[in-house]
Image (cartoon, rainbow, N blue to C red):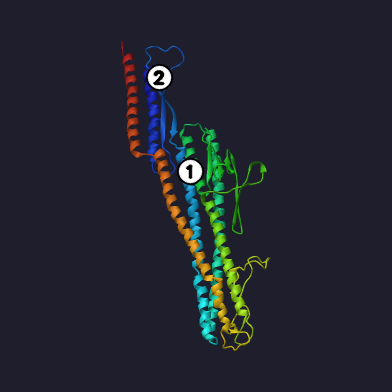
Amino acid sequence: MSDLLSIGASGVRAYQTALSVVGENIANSGTVGYSRRSVTTAEVAAGIGVAEKSTAGNGVRLTGITRASDDYAASAVRNAGADLARTETSATWLDRVQKALTGNQLTERVTGFFTATTALAAEPTSNALRSSMLSAADSAATAFAATAQSFDQMGQDIDTQAGQAITTLNSLSAGLTRINEGLGRTTPGTAAAAQLVDQRDQILEQMSAIVDVGVNTDALGRVTVSAGGQGGPTLVQGDFAATVRYSRTAGAVALSVSTRGGDPDAILVPNGGALAGLDEAADRMAGARSTLNTIATNFFTQMNAVQTAGQDLTNTQGTKLFVGDPVDPANPAAPLDPARFKVALTSGSQIAAATLGTDVRNGGNLTGYTTARTTGGFETGLTTLVNNAATAYKQKSVVADAQTAIRDGAANALSSATGVNVDSEAIDLMRFQQAYQASSRVIQVARDTFQSILEIR
């Protein structure tokens, strides 16, 4: 009877654990990052030696708690998430570039300036028209300056976002080393090990949203992570977590990763994640700002050339219409910085409308603005700049929509492989409940039988 009792007791213990695991699955059916658990059982092996023929067996034992996993699906989710994060981040900043170029109505104000010069040419001595032209010039200079300042602010914001992303990435790397240490101390096939692996996979997914990662896993579930995909610099290995560093110079982003042993930092070239999107955004922003600088420099240089070629209402040779500083103060030959542009004239009477040596009623010098407008192509250049930004943003948005669908498909595939199906768990719950009750009944039968034997006289 002791054999029957121990067999029933082993069943109660095994199925009690099985019921707890099913209950845990049901309770966490809506928990993000939770992977389904299941129990594995095996027959208790007979002892070494000759077994009696009358022995039926030794019961059941719990061999472990298995966590549902699909490494391929998890990798697909990380890769799709990294691609989407790069595209969405880049699209966000491209939208800001577009808004910076259009928000101050720069093209319209440049057109308004040329319109004012044409109006003044018809009546060169009109104080009202001179004031109107001076106001239009100031409006154009202000629009150039405001647009350039928007780009400067954008660069600072990119640095801030990148710094936050780097801080988060370094923190996640440090957290992953602690999970590696925990997995090294935890017995495989236990609930504790399953929980640690869940946390590990959630961290890896968060890391892949910042930078694409390559992941290698050992038999205990500990991971070695490289940044920039497989073959990139190591971010995490065992209890070592590297430090990622960021810098930006003249629009060029530089990322590096610290190495073990004090060796020089390894260069990080991200192919996915928010850092890749910020790298791309910084490059596009720098290109747009450079084009803006060139257009602004040509505009102010040619407008000043026209102004200084004529004479004003006092028959004095004209002085510069606009003033500004180069983007590099140490290099006077560098393009002018539109962020520091302003109108130099203080009165409409200083506008040099007349050709040198003619009467103040002459407006011949103003035709130079029309010529410069045609040859300089300022409005065309600005329109092209805006259109290129708008087109790039639209293309990124289309790609983001497609990548969202890909990421969602990968997430659904992972959920199908590792997620909790409440209907299936309900069936397991009833099955294990019946097995538990039956095992309890075996114990009761053993006790009743044993009691009957004791009562025999």
Residue 343 at least partly seen: no
For this rendering, which residue is in front, 389 or 345?
Answer: 389
Q: Seen in the image, is 452 located left or right of residue 315?
A: left
* Mark 2 Cα shell of 10 Å, populated few (<14), some (14-19), many (≥20): some
Number of numbered discs overlaid on the protein picture:
2
For this rendering, which residue is in front, 142 or 170?
Answer: 142
Which residue was labeled with disc 2? 58
- Secondary element at image label 2: loop
Quadrant of the rendered image containing residue 351: bottom right
Amino acid residing under circle 2: Asn
For this rendering, which residue is in front, 205 or 41?
Answer: 205
Q: Is residue 29 above or below residue 118?
A: above
Quadrant of the rendered image containing residue 73: top left
Q: Position of residue 388 (x, y in %)?
A: 50, 62
Q: Residue at x 38, y 35 (%)?
A: 22
**Image mark for residue 387:** none
